[in-house]
Amino acid sequence: MFSKIKEIEDRFEHLENELARPDIFQDNKIYRKYSKEHSTLSPIITTYRRYQSVQKEINDSMTLLDDPDRCSRIVRKGAHGSMHS
């Protein structure tokens, strides 16, 4: 599943690069085609990147749980900081 999404992301990035070229406006047909495809892929890529971000947060949190000393330092620091707010 993710290999297909990666292909979509690669295509999306290619379209962004093409749309950023100044000479793209010289061919209105290609510009419209790329713009339409880009807008179709945009919600997919936004969701995929959000998913990647959440996965990273989960992995970071799991790492903290595996290190009780670091976790308790962060909790103490957070509690200490909130008392001075």
Image (spheres, helix red, strand yellow):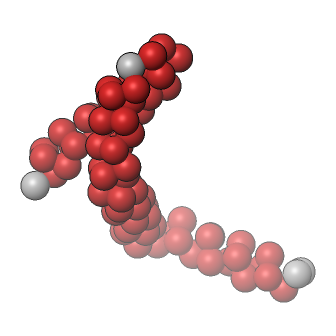
**Left or right: 73, with 22 as reference point:** right
51, 23: nearer the viewer: 23
> Which of 19/11 is in front?
19
In the picture provided, is 64 more to the left or to the right than 51?
Answer: right
**Horizontal and vertical percent position of residue 46:** 39, 56
Query: Where does residue 25 sit, x and y in percent of width and height?
Result: 47, 22
Q: Is residue 25 visible?
A: yes
Q: Is residue 66 visible?
A: no
Q: Position of residue 62 (x, y in %)?
A: 37, 68
Left or right position of 61 against 55:
right
Q: Is residue 7 above or below residue 80?
A: above
Residue 63 in the image: x percent, y percent?
A: 39, 63
Q: Nearer the viewer, residue 74 or 32?
A: 32
Which image quarter is the N terminus in? Answer: bottom left
Report the front residue among 33 and 55. Answer: 33
Q: Where is residue 14, by image quadrant?
A: top left
Q: Residue at x 30, y 50 (%)?
A: 41
- Note whether 85 is above or below 8 in the view shown: below
Residue pushed farthest right?
A: 84
Task: Please identify the residue farthest to the front as the structure is shown.
Answer: 28
Examine the rendered structure and indicate whether residue 70 appears above or below residue 3. Answer: below
Seen at 13% across and 45% down, the residue is 3
Q: Quadrant of the C terminus?
A: bottom right
Residue depicted at 45% across the width and 16% down the height:
26
Is 47 on the left or on the right of 67, as rendered?
left
